[in-house]
């Protein structure tokens, strides 16, 4: 019987494979060594003093403490890329990471710009949000101006900007310093949330329309049953005054038109002028029919 020759295990082929492995390992070692040399050189160059941020400069902030912002930026650039490359390098400092971290930590910041100026100074230019309104909880307490627990108001309020974005906790204000919003938020935490995001500008427009009508709205409450109430000022006391009631999904232009028509028609016209302090509500939920009630 003739035996087949084992070609794959022939001494010549095994020797050839062995040489190929040696060549591959040699090339791979040279590649790794070259890569390490390049990385070492880059790491060395990236650490050169003239290529690294020397100082941090903050501008534009009025409420947030400068030193707190500076420490937050300093902490971010004190880190390293891949344990070797300093993030203080003026060419690849983590601009986007700094912006994101500052935005997450300080909700009051509306705009953040970074640039490296002469003298290796990292300049952080800030624009803070303006506190225009307050959100004071999911439900309204008509006595929240009068009732305290350990000298603290029951309803904690938060500042809103012109877009309805909630960005900071508000201190207690006596009286009608800021227009107040009440109602549920889409997210659990107030900070970083929007109040009625899709409809906020319409609510502000309605508020301004009422002011143009010589009324003085001081609070708005979006209730769970899709009803909205606007509270007018009660100048005789700290509690809120009359309510203007309408459906949350109503045409706000129609709401104001119906209200204007009602206030120009007797007997509401005279009663509103002479008995304002006893007015309880004006109900605009039923189309062109307007209902109102005065305290007896």
Image (spheres, grey):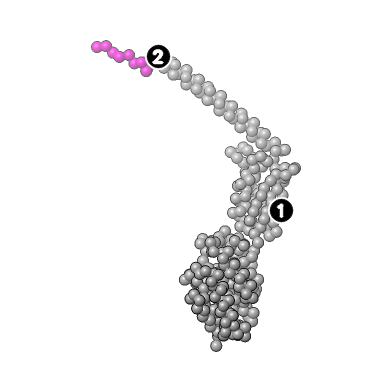
- Residue 230: x %, y % from top left: 56, 73
* Residue found at x 58% / y 64%: 201
Asked if one can make out residue 235 in the rendered structure from this viewpoint, the answer is yes
Is 20 left, or right, of 134 in this rendering? left
Above or below, 231 against 187 in this view is below
What is the residue that sits farthest to the bottom in this orientation?
296
What is the residue that sits farthest to the top in this orientation?
2
Please tell me whether mark 1 sits on a helix, a strand or a loop. strand
Indicate which label's residue lies in the foreground, 1 or 2.
1
The residue labelled by disc 1 is 59
* Residue found at x 70% / y 43%: 53
- Residue 127: x %, y % from top left: 67, 55
Is 41 left, or right, of 196 in this rendering? right
Asked if one can make out residue 229 in the rendered structure from this viewpoint, the answer is no
Residue 11 has which mark?
2
Contact between labelled residues 2 and 1, with CB atoms less than 8 Å apart? no
Q: How far is disc 1 from disc 2 in space, using C-alphas? A: 76 Å
Give the quadrant of the C terminus: bottom right
What is the residue that sits farthest to the right in this orientation?
119
In the image, the segment drawn in magenta is: 1-13
What is the quadrant of residue 231 in the picture?
bottom right
Please tell me whether mark 2 sits on a helix, a strand or a loop. helix
Give the quadrant of the N terminus: top left
- Residue 215: x %, y % from top left: 62, 76
- Please tell me which of labels 1 and 2 falls first in the chain: 2
């Amino acid at each position: 019987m003739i035996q087949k020759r084992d070609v794959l295990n022939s001494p010549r082929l095994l020797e050839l494979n062995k040489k190929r492995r040696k060549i591959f390992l040699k090339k791979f070692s040279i590649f790794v060594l070259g890569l390490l040399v390049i990385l070492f050189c880059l790491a060395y160059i990236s650490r050169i003093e003239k290529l690294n941020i020397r100082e941090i400069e903050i501008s534009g902030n009025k409420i947030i403490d400068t030193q707190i912002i500076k420490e937050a930026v300093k902490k971010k650039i004190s880190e390293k890329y891949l344990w070797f490359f300093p993030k203080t390098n003026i060419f690849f400092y983590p601009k986007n990471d700094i912006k994101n971290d500052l935005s997450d930590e300080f909700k009051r910041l509306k705009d953040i710009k970074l640039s490296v100026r002469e003298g290796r100074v990292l300049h952080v230019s800030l624009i803070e949000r303006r506190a225009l309104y307050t959100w004071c909880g999911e439900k309204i307490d008509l006595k929240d101006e009068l009732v305290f627990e350990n000298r603290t108001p029951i309803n904690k309020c938060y500042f809103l900007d012109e877009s309805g974005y909630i960005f900071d906790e508000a201190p207690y204000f006596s009286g009608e310093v800021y227009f107040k919003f009440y109602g549920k938020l889409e997210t659990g935490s107030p900070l970083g949330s929007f109040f009625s995001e899709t409809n906020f500008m319409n609510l502000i427009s309605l508020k301004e329309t009422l002011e143009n009508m010589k009324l003085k709205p001081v609070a708005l409450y979006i209730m769970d049953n899709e009803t909205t109430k606007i509270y007018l000022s009660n100048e005789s006391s700290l509690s809120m005054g009359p309510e203007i009631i309408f459906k949350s999904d109503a045409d706000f232009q129609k709401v104001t038109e119906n209200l204007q028509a009602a206030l120009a028609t007797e007997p509401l016209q005279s009663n509103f002028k002479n008995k304002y302090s006893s007015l309880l509500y004006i109900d605009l939920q039923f189309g062109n029919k307007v209902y109102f009630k005065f305290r007896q």
